[in-house]
Amino acid sequence: MEGLFFNVNGGYIEGIVRGYRNTLLTGQNYNNLIQCETIDDIKLQLSPAYGDFLASLPPNPSTSSLANKTTDKLVAEFRYLQAQAVGSIAKFMEYLTYGYMIDNVALLITGTLHERDTRELLERCHPLGWFETMPVLCVATNIEELYNSVLIETPLAPYFKGSLSHQDLDELNIEIVRNTLYKNYLEDFYKFVAEDPELKGTPTSEVMAEVLEFEADRRAINITLNSFGTELSKQDRKKLYPGFGGLYPEGTLMLSRADDLEGVALAVSGNHDYKSYFDQVGMSGGTSGVGNMAGGGAETKSLEDMFYQKEMEISKTVFTRQFTHAVIYAWVKLREQVLLALHRLRYRWLIWK
């Protein structure tokens, strides 16, 4: 039983999110979008859901301008929800922003390493990953100063402490840094939805466990595949896997020992979905390269496509559940579908040109 608190505040927020559902793309909308041949065609397709934010754009705008406007609408609605939220749902929404914060901090670290003006990089940071003290990071002139600022000035400090030192923040380790932070973040988020007094034993805890376990599995699989041919040792690779998930612990143990694609396919073979993904993209026989993660052609689905499709299916299913904060998570993920479509169209047009 969720209790009176959820019905008053959580139910109110959930109702608003369900009202936002008309801005989500249907399967037909998505198909129409990827068939567009001009920017104005895309703008027309997006107008019913984003018209108020697209109105200021000139004719034939860039795909990046469209992406920025769709992001602006998501951020405006998300911040509105945050302003209404209290208690566990307010904390839940904070957790949703931490992933974006990690990406933003990684971007600033990279900029500092290359001695770029980090103030310029602020414009490239995702708005949902913005925090009040982020401009303070731009004062840092070297990695050690930036590291100390992160530990003091950002909500990510707990994910650095005990896991990373300033010596780790070099160019060779930036992806290790990012994956370490994500590991700590996912484990913390998983613990929150399972143990918070307002969420323990509720639909939110149940649904988010499935969502986060899938994300943990996806990251473990991708980390393993991307480690082949690099200097990352098996022991260090294992440290990057979240300590939970559908594959944990037997599957992740096998992943940590895998030497090739066949080893990864064997590690995930106990999970029907993951096994079918590897079978469909031809990665289960050990004969295909890691490059197949990116797909083999316009009509070929990649492993990442399969994971994305699974994420969308989970997100859509969340909307069939009642009394759960998870609808906010699902709504954000489904809204990101628009951005993915725009990025794919931009890539396709660049190839055609």
Image: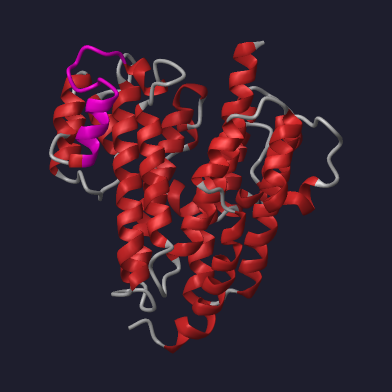
Front residue of this view, candidates 59 and 176: 59
Question: Magenta span covers which residues?
Answer: 273-289
Vertical order, 85 against 303 (above or below): below
Front residue of this view, candidates 118 and 276: 276
Residue 278 colored magenta?
Answer: yes
Residue 175 colored magenta?
Answer: no
The quarter of the displayed image where residue 2 is located: bottom left
From where the camera sits, is residue 85 visible?
yes
Q: Residue furthest bottom?
A: 4
From where the camera sits, is residue 105 visible?
no
Q: How is the image coloured?
A: secondary structure
Tell me the residue at 53%/63% (across/down): 93
Vertical order, 92 against 28 (above or below): below
Number of marks in picture:
0
Tell me the residue at 37%/65% (across/down): 192
Front residue of this view, candidates 73 and 345: 345
The quarter of the displayed image where residue 228 is located: top left
* Image location of residue 9, percent across then percent down: 53, 80
Which quadrant: the N terminus?
bottom left
Front residue of this view, candidates 61 and 219: 61
